[in-house]
Image (cartoon, helix red, strand yellow):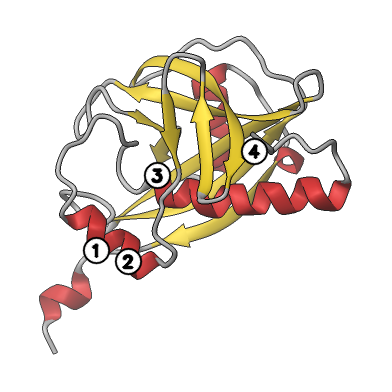
Amino acid sequence: MDSVSILEQPYINITNIIWSFDKTTNKVNILFVKRDNEPFNGYWALPETFMRTNESADEAALRLVKAKIGMALSDSHTEQLATFTNRLRTPNQRTLSLAYMTFLPDKPKLKPGYGASDARWFSMAYTKTGYIFSDGELSFSTAESQTETQYYAKLAHAGNQRDHLAYDHEWILKVACDRIKNKLDYQQYPAGLGA
């Protein structure tokens, strides 16, 4: 066996889908940040951070919420979504992402934290092909690919396109939005996902 491959230690980061449901507009809102460092400097993305050696993934997810929007939450507000490990998800050092979802009952005012030059709430709408997010000025959509394999094959050849989110966040959002839609359907909220 190749000992170099066995001993490789990828980075572990926490990607946090921070969301809220606005009962006035019947819309789900998701927090995006504009990255202020490389890679993907100037791109919009989901908030993320590297997990520290002295904390659990759950603790890192809650620390991320506090760092990005200044809210200290209990662990009842957050849940793990999925783990994303495709080797093509980051351009340099291999990085595994433990994705979390954090529900906020209200949308707080935003102040970008470390590593971000801007932070905004984007409202979510559902279309026949996926989900779109808009703040009235900018808009992004989830991955159009139906399978993870198709998505990462396209991502590897996409190059730098500022109209896309950083890393594989369009795929992570696709998975997260399916979960959010199921939650809202189950909890019988008003139909706030229709365009």
The percent position of residue 168, horizontal first and vertical second, equals 34, 49
The percent position of residue 179, horizontal first and vertical second, equals 65, 53
As rendered, which of 18 and 113 lies closer to the eye? 18
Task: First in sequence, mark 4 or 1: give its number.
Answer: 4
Q: Residue at x 64, y 38 (%)?
A: 102
Task: First in sequence, mark 4 or 3: give its number.
Answer: 4
Quick one: label 3, few (<14), some, or many (20+) residues within 10 Å?
many
| Residue marked by disc 4 | 102
Q: Amino acid at mark 3?
A: His
The secondary element bearing badge 1 is classed as: helix
Q: Residue at x 29, y 61 (%)?
A: 152
Circle number at residue 169: 3
The secondary element bearing badge 2 is classed as: helix
Q: Residue at x 24, y 58 (%)?
A: 154
The percent position of residue 171, horizontal first and vertical second, equals 42, 52
Task: First in sequence, mark 3 or 2: give its number.
Answer: 2
Q: Amino acid at mark 2?
A: Gln
Mark toward the viewer: 4 or 1: 1
| Residue marked by disc 2 | 150
The percent position of residue 54, horizontal first and vertical second, equals 46, 45
The answer to whether 69 appears left or right of 23 in the picture is left
